[in-house]
Image (cartoon, rainbow, N blue to C red):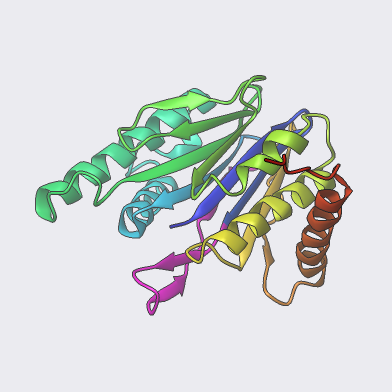
Amino acid sequence: MTYCVALKLDRGLVFMSDTRTNAGFDNISTFRKLHCWSAPGKAVITLLTAGNLATTQAVVSLLDERGKAADDRNPSILEQPSMFQVVRLVGETLREVIARQADTGERADAAFNASIIVGGQVGTGATRLFLIYPEGNFIEASADTPYFQVGETKYGRPILVRAFDRDMSFADAVKLLMVSFDSTIKANLTVGLPLDYQLYESDSMAPGPIRRIDMEDEYFNVISTGWGDALKAAFHSLPPFTIPSG
């Protein structure tokens, strides 16, 4: 299992993912699930991947390989004319990889499934954010749905629903995601540190660096402890419940 989130703010995009993969409690590994392609002044595209690791790695490798030699290995993700066409390409690549693996390996429909969040900006187009399903179809973030989650989503969702604000700063957005991820990590052992995150400021046409939060990160540990204490304090501040007699 995994957990990935992307937020669409008024000022840009914020991406965060965990790095844990597991095939049982005694077989846990760390793999990056946040990937970025960019061409200065032309395009910035970031992917968050969740699902079967072989599937997601194959999709990223295909996109990466085709992008390095666009003349010989079209279509290149950085040569697409719009974010819509970028997402179509990623969706088609995901569907292609799943179909190929299903034809040569296990027959279970869900064995090779994966979901992908894609965000970024191409040329003079708007900054956009999409969620791609295993079938290759996709939806776009909107004012009503300004963020996407994939993987183990239920534990970290309540804080996003209550505290997300499109006008929040990048710093507050990262703090919000840290709380969301801490809640998920506490509730599900299949999600864990390190965490990777990246920021993209709209119209900058330059990707922010991918930063890593590990177990020794002082601020994350403060957030984790502080959030737990704040929840306890909020609980005890609520009016007492009186059990009816009789």
Q: Using the rendered view, name the quadrant where residue 99 is placed.
A: top left
Measured along the vertical axis of the image, is residue 240 above or below residue 216? above
In this picture, which residue range is highlighted in magenta?
18-40
State the image coordinates of residue 90 (x, y, percent, origin top left): 40, 37
Q: Using the rendered view, name the quadrant where residue 145 is placed.
A: top right
Please check the rendered image and state whether residue 74 is part of the magenta-colored stretch, yes or no.
no
State the image coordinates of residue 158 (x, y, percent, origin top left): 66, 41
Q: Quadrant of the N terminus?
A: bottom left
Asked whether the viewer can see residue 169, the reply is yes
Please check the rendered image and state whether residue 21 is part of the magenta-colored stretch, yes or no.
yes
In the picture as drawn, the residue positioned furthest to the bottom comes out as 26
Measured along the vertical axis of the image, is residue 225 above or below residue 15? below
| Front-most of residues 168 and 161 | 161
Asked whether the viewer can see residue 81, the reply is no
| Front-most of residues 33 and 238 | 238
State the image coordinates of residue 76 (x, y, percent, origin top left): 41, 39
Q: Quadrant of the C terminus?
A: top right
Give me the residue at 58% from left, 54% from top. 17
